[in-house]
Image: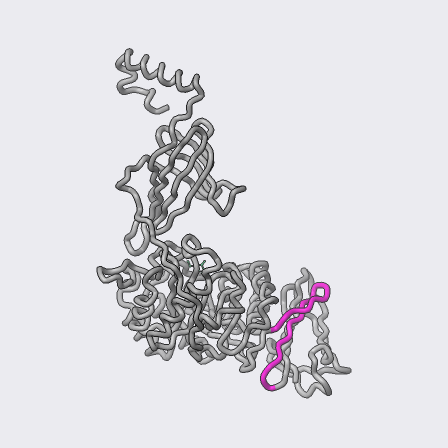
Amino acid sequence: MRFLNGGLYARVPAARAALFICFALSAALGQAQSLAGIWTQPGKTLDNGEQQKWVLALKQNGSELTGTLKVLDYAVELKGTATGTHFELFAPWQPDRAYMTGDLVDGELHGMERGHRPVLAKAGTTADDIPTVSYIEPPALKAVTDNGLAKTPPMGWNSWNLFAGKIDDQTVRTMADAMVSSGMKDAGYVYVNIDDTWEGVRDANGNLQSNQKFPDMKALADYVHSKGLKLGIYSSPGPRTCAGYPASYGHEDQDARTFAGWGVDYLKYDWCSARNIYKNDALQPVYQKMGAALEATGRPMVYSLCEYGWGEVEKWGPAVGGNLWRTTGDIRDSWDSMMGNVEKQVPTAAYAGPGRWNDPDMLEIGNGHMTDDEYRTHMSLWALVASPLLAGNDIRTMTDATKAILLNKEVIAVDQDALGKQASPRKNGDLETWMKPLADGSVAVGVVNLGSSAAQATVKASDLGLSGKVKKARDLWAHSDVKFSNGAYAATVPSHGVLMLRVK
Ligand code: GLA
């Protein structure tokens, strides 16, 4: 114990003796030092100047602990046990795994939060308290009018996959320039979407401002528009976004008006901290609230729901005004993550159509951790499942290979097909075949090789539901016509590669 060294203890024998007796007594009685009190730990400083922190107010009754953990704008009730100086605290939603564990060491809490975040909390006072957010009842269900947007899956670019918190005005402007110069805009990519971490703080009237990384959001929107592109932005129905910035809880109408005033054309609305306020049965009315707020502004804004596919969003997304909705957790730049996300599309297939799209998350093409074969598969599958095509790479510095993938107009045409059907897979050993009927009566087909070595793929006209002779068949990656003979076409597909045809 630090207080046993030096100072009063070393110099005054009586004090030393008294301290020793206290210590020995409490040890002998097996008495725990009290964990009760207010504990606080600072977090990182956000780009809007706010200092993240948490405050834990603990009560102890014998070995029983109860307390409230407050983070900026939300609170979690914790319960647990104390064994001597050791403590374990559990959140109500996970009784089998400790939310926080640790020990009282020299008057500080040392431990781990959710198994991975170090805890080093100091004793605080009531002045450290964070005001509790009051509960706002979500509105009654009432359908939001269809905004008529996104008749084909939205196409554009989003900052999150590559830049995450390191996005700013200058990067967005240069990305908009590159959208034009690279040919992305001409290929149909028009939305330039700023994801999380643009948020500042609210002004005295409650208007949400952008932070110092985005000095003038209206001017940025004007710039993006001047390039013939559209601007997207990001918020959450909770008090805080996933990165901890202020979000739209209790300010839905006001924020929708702010976004409209800036000239925003697209909103991604991410559940995040809403999970600390609402139960999952509130997903629908809570998303409807922002849907109605966007509608009330009179400005057309694509509405992108991001709640990871919870509550069968594909069934009610359109009723709350949504144009697209995430159906999965976050994608990562890996084969398993990409394939995992697209395979989760299966139960949602029947619900896709013009104005209503399932979203297996943004593209990772060009971010460097998959092979070009894998990225071609990524692009093909996103097109076959009629997914939004939101590039997530640095389009200012794309390699020719990345360009050829993102700018493959024949594959993009499959994604953007007016019929809006979503392909489903059929598995045969290592080969997975996805088929998508198209508006002109032809069928797009992708055969993916899941195996670790090259394999022969055979596409049979009869399997495509096409009656009669194949009039035209085109390999959409080779950009050349191919010939069916005896009603079939066969080709070698590399490991994790794809054969993608359009057959009429
Ligand atoms: C969530 C979303 C991501 C991204 C981040 C931003 O994880 O699913 O797509 O928007 O939040 O914080």
Residue 170 place in picture, x, y as percent: 32, 66
Identify the residue at image location x=58%, y=84%.
439
Image quadrant where residue 349 sits: bottom right
Residue 128 place in picture, x, y as percent: 29, 42
Residue 4 place in picture, x, y as percent: 34, 20
Ligand 1 quadrant assignment: bottom left
Considering depth in this image, is 79 or 257 the residue closer to the camera? 79
The image shows residue 416, relative to residue 382, as above or below, that is: below
Whether the magenta-drawn stretch holds residue 10 is answered as no
Q: Residue furthest front?
A: 140
Identify the residue at image location x=68%, y=88%.
471
Q: Is residue 15 left or right of residue 428?
A: left
Start-end of magenta stretch: 423-440
Considering depth in this image, is 308 or 219 the residue closer to the camera? 308
Image quarter of the N terminus: top left
The image shows residue 177, relative to residue 211, as above or below, that is: below
Visible in this render: residue 290? yes
Determine the main secondary structure of the stretch shown in magenta: strand
